[in-house]
Structures are given as C-alpha cells and as structure tokens.
Amino acid sequence: MNSGINGMTDKPIEITMVASEMFPFAKSGGLGDVIGALPLALGRMGHKVCVYLPAYRSVVRKYAPGSPVRIPGVFSGARYDIFSLEHEGVSVRLVAADDLFDRAGFYGDARGAFPDNAERFARFARGALSHMEGESAHPSVIHCHDWQSALIPSLLKYRRADDEKWSGVSTVFSIHNLAYQGRFHPDEFAHTCLPDEAMGVEGLEFYGDVNFMKGGILFSDVFSTVSERYAQEMLTAEQGEGLEGVVVLRKESLFGIMNGIDDAVWNPESDPHIPAPFSSAHPEAKAECKAALQAELGLDAGAEGPLCVVVSRLAHQKGIDLVLETMDELMGLGVSLAVLGTGDEDLEKGLAEAASAYRGRVAFVPAYDEALSHRMYAGGDVLLMPSRYEPSGLNQLYAMRYGALPYVRRVGGLADSVISSPTPEADSDTGFHFDAFAAADFLAGVKGICRVFLDQGLWRMMMRNAMEKNSGWDGVAPRYVELYEKAMRPQPR
Ligand code: ADP
C-alpha cells in the first residue's frame, strides 16, 4: 500500500466523489454519514478530495455562498449552475439543473418518489462531469455512490473513447444498498444522453427497463459495497435483488469494506446533544442519560428489564414489523421500548397504537431528529436492529460507541461488526445476534438478553468491549486508498 508514516500518503491522489447525500449538508440515512466522513479522513491522509452534491433547496439556502457559476453541459445543450464551498479541507460543488433540485425533499415527498427522478439524477451525473470537463486538471479517480451517481461510469466509458483527457480517469462505484437501483421506464433512457447501444442487455437494459445501477456495476473499474458479508450476499439470488447475475459477472472486481463512524461527531465524552458525558473508563453518567431519556419520552423509570431503542427508517428492510408482532411478549419480559423513525404508514400506525396501549413502557417519536438520535443511543441499554438485510448499518456502530448493546439479525454488516458468542463472553462480546427472521427466534434472543441484564457485572464488561471497539474512519480510509490504487491499474475484463 501507498501509505507513509502516520497514515499520511507519500503520493497524494486526486479523488472526486459524486453522491446524493453528505452530512451535514444533506442526510437521510447511512450514505449521508459516509460521505460526511470518508472524504475528510482521506483529506487527513494527504489526498485531495472534491465532492459533488445536488444543489437541493435546503442546502443552497443554508450553505451556498454567493452566486453560482454557469457552465455549459457537454452531453446536450443543457446548462448547469455550480456553487462552490470548502468544508473541513474538502471542496464541495453543488450542481443545480434548472429547478430539478430546487424543491423540498431529496428523492420525494409525501406523495412518494418524485416522478422525474430519472431526469433529476441523470442531469446530476451529466452536470458533475460537465463541470469536471471544464476544470484544468481531471481527477485520478471518480468515486460514485449508489444509483443516483451510477450513470457516471457509463457516461465515462463512451467519453473516454471520444476524448483522450478522460482516458486516465478511473472509476469506483460503491453500493450502499442494492435494493435501490434507479430502475425506470425505458423512455427515461433518453435523459442519460448515452448512445442507443448502451440500452442493450450488455448495458443498462434490465427486463425491458433502464437500470442506472446496472451500468455502475458493469462499467466501473472496480466496485465495492459496505461490508464483506454483504459483498458475498449480493452474489446470491436471496439478496441479489435481481442483479446477482450482473454482480457475479464482475465479482473479481468487487470488494467489501465495512463502514466506519465519524468519532468526532459520535463521541459520548464530548457530545453536545447528550445531557451528561461518559466514557468506557467512566460509564457512570450513562445512567443519567437513561433517566433523562425516560423523562423526555414519558417512560417509567421503574421497568426491571433493559430499555430497548430503535433509531431507523421505518422501511420493510429494517424488520420493525417483528418488534410489532412480538410487542405483547416483549412487554411480558419487562423491557421498555423507545422508537425514533419515520417511514411506512402501517409501521408508524402500529407503533403509535403500541405507544398508547403501553403508556409509560413504549414511546414512539415519528420524526427525523438528529439530536434525539444521539440521546437515544446514549440513554438506551439495547439497540434493536432486526433487519431483513443490512449492507453495513451504522446505528449498531453508534450504539456500541455509546454503550447500548446491539441486538441484531446476523446478516450483512451487522454480522461483521457485532461480536456475539453462543454463551456471552465477557472478554470479547459487544452485543447479541439472532438468525431466522421469525418471532420465536427474535424473542428467544430477547429472553437471553434479559438474563444477561440481570448480571450487571457481565453487562458492564460487554458495554466496555462495545465502547472500546475502534470503528473510526481513519482506520477505514486506507482501505479505500487501496481500492483507488486497484482502480488506477488496468483491470481484467
Ligand atoms: P440506512 O442508511 O439504511 O438508513 P444506516 O444504519 O446505514 O441505515 O444509517 C442510518 C443513519 O440514519 C444513522 O446515522 C441513524 O442514526 C440515522 N437515522 C435513521 N433514522 C433516523 C431518525 N428518525 N432520526 C435521526 N436519525 C436517524
């Protein structure tokens, strides 16, 4: 690897990321956290990093300085406005395309996904590349994330043939969730500005539709996902979301890298959002955080079982229906439950009903609230994450850092990051697992957790293991550098 002392590189790489979210500018889930932290960690290693984001209305209003620069599009007659700002050593470019991003919501509103998302994100990818084209130096690597920027490797494949300047630019495509593919009616292909031949079976065509992610997988130099286990799962019919055949085709160029966490933002010793700081050496004040959370959410302080918390998008993927299905039994076990999340109407309704049926034992906050999420991890004893699948998962990493032991289904990044032995091991375990997505298996695990909770000596040892687990991005970023170096070498096809 190309790293010198202290993680500093002796050969800086010019890296350009293109993504639809970046904390603190725009975040709806884990992707926002990753792009909020990985570029900064690469910058600390000495690399030069630039990030392209859509110019969402909320971001422009809060962060964009001055007037944008108007640039011509290189794929069509379209024009773009580019705002530039600097953020902790990273250059950020906001791409405005007519009024496509000047609206409330990133991907949709209360009525669902925006009907023009194909056009919006095709224009985003084309606008970002158009701006790079006008810059004096091209990056060495363009790192794209998820379907919203997945057209870039496809656009570059053809651009490289036409224009020598692009031939030295490599592409890396990272999949944060294979289920969201950017799949649209074939008429939407016109927005890509790709030649017709790109709409074949060996291109973006997918069961008659156009699939942006398929192009990202096929035409990037290397591609990755956010845990080693999910990289394996993506090759299977169960988890491959219909794209497993395409993933298998390129499996020699697929890598799994577990996400990290931004340990400046997620640090219980210095977190401005929590009522009392604590650490693995001095965890005592966690009890104060728990009492404050119970008071804030109207939960009884006297429950004998652990306080279980959920911080999640309420999507089918996250398996919260299993919690609803077993609610009566959970209450019978003496646990209390606090849920922060928004999403599916049925899940929101079920949780609201449980909160009114079990007043004082169940609390539900149907909101997206960054500050409260910190207080939930700090005040909770256990984080529940019964996901059907989970590419990486960040919540369990935050929970461990804040001494809330994760109870997770043994899939994807949850399996890779939470250590759990058949009989809890005081020296190593950081949480609890269950396997089958079934009420009986889930409940059996909760019973075991309640037993361990009674053994406060063991519980505190596990809390210490969890809090001391090192998951910072500075340990992860060098693995991405290896990936960029692989991408920059000619790839077998
Ligand atoms: P995903 O990206 O699938 O939503 P991750 O576990 O990778 O799942 O990341 C979720 C991120 O979103 C975490 O930072 C979590 O704290 C945050 N999050 C999810 N729901 C909420 C919410 N309702 N309020 C605040 N933060 C939330």
Image (cartoon, rainbow, N blue to C red):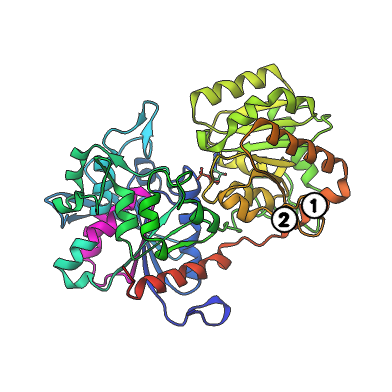
Q: Does the magenta-highlighted stretch encompass residue 150?
A: yes
Q: Position of residue 323 (x, y in %)?
A: 64, 30
Highlighted range, magenta = 127-156
Give the image quarter of residue 262. bottom right
The reply to whether discs 2 and 1 touch (Cβ–Cβ < 8 Å) is: yes
Q: Would residue 443 be found to the left or right of residue 232 on screen?
A: right
Residue in the picture at 55% in, 21% down: 349
Kindly identify which residue carries mark 2: 467
- The percent coordinates of residue 90 (x first, y second) are 42, 63
Amino acid type, label 1: Pro
Label 2: how many Cα within 10 Å (few below 14, some 14–19, many 20+): many
For the point 40% across and 65% down, the residue is 253
| Secondary structure at numbered mark 1 | loop
Q: CA distance from mark 2 to mark 1?
A: 10 Å
Mark closer to the chain start, 2 or 1: 1
Tell me if residue 298 comes above or below residue 399 in the rendering: above
On screen, 103 above or below 456? above
Can the viewer see residue 140 in this picture? yes
